[in-house]
Amino acid sequence: MIVTDTHCHLYWNSFDEDRSEVLARARAAGVQRMVVVGTEVETSRSAAELAESDPEIWCSAGIHPHDAEGSDPVARERIRELASRERCVAVGETGLDWFKEFSPREAQLDSFAWHLDLAADLDKPVIVHCRDAHEATADLVSSHRLRRGVMHCYAYGPDELAPYLEAGYHVSFSGVVTYPRNEANREAARQVPLDRILVETDSPFLAPQGHRGKRNEPALVVPILERVAELRGMTPSELAEVTSANAARLFGLPGS
Ligand SMILES: [Zn+2]
Ligand SMILES: [Zn+2]
């Protein structure tokens, strides 16, 4: 079984003590491939370093909506340089977060639009974070020329899927799909076309049920995959093959 964790933040300081053990546990669990996602200039640089140190790790470069206030011309120039590198397979994470609203909405909208333009210019997919901002996100995604991306940590139900699928985006399920109250999210996981579905941990955040409140790590994409496989009436290894092939195609990884 070859599993791909399409979204993790392995550079996070909670991994500083035992990053090599975390990677070894991931590989032992079948999680061969990972995409390490940047959230601002420094973390995008750290993600690039990790990707350059391991042939089965790739990275993205972008400015998280929480940090959108810092999405100024200097930061954007650095992100453009990092995103242009060979090991960088996506632009982001970007998007809109109306829940925490750590940056003003105007700054988030402006930064998101800039990332969509960058992804289109570089011909790379975009990684979109969306929390309590479905309508504004769908508007931007639908009206932009970019037709390649992923709705990361998709936390909505089946009713919100249409604009993203119509725009050609993939939909990635996280630990959220394992939480007891999230039946609507499980219904979305049943309905996403099989050629658009991905899995991710978003580690160190959002540990799946049974591990909640603890640090998440890439090995724990396996229980997420198992839950989604059960919802789809597939075996975990069948779904692992499908989601890894989807990730390879979306991010242009070897074997796609
Ligand atoms: Zn996110
Ligand atoms: Zn993330």
Image (cartoon, grey):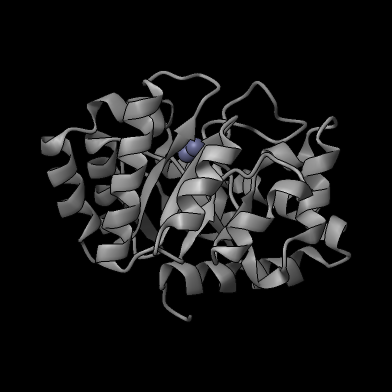
The count of marks equals 0
Q: Residue 131 placed where, x, y %?
A: 57, 32
Question: Looking at the rendering, which quadrant does residue 112 occupy?
Answer: top left
Q: Is residue 189 above or below residue 22?
A: below
Q: Is residue 135 above or below residue 58?
A: above
Residue 238 as seen in the image, left or right of residue 93: right
- Indicate the position of residue 213 as horizontal and vertical percent values: 65, 21
Residue at 26 percent of width and 50 percent of height: 48
Left or right? Give the position of 255 relative to 79: right
Quick check: can you spot residue 1? no
Give the position of the N terminus as an image quadrant: bottom right
Q: Residue at x 55, y 30 (%)?
A: 205
Q: Position of residue 8 (x, y in %)?
A: 48, 44
Residue located at (57% from left, 28% from top): 215
Residue 80, percent from left and from top: 18, 52
Along the viewing direction, whichever of 206 and 110 lies nearer the viewer: 110
Q: Is residue 44 visible in the rendered structure shown here?
A: yes
| Foreground pick, 226 / 78 | 78
The residue at 70%/30% (across/down) is 211
Residue 103 is left or right of residue 137, and the answer is: left
Foreground residue, 178 or 73? 73
In the figure, is residue 48 to the left or right of 221?
Answer: left
For this orientation, the residue located farthest to the bottom is 255
- Front-most of residues 89 and 51: 89
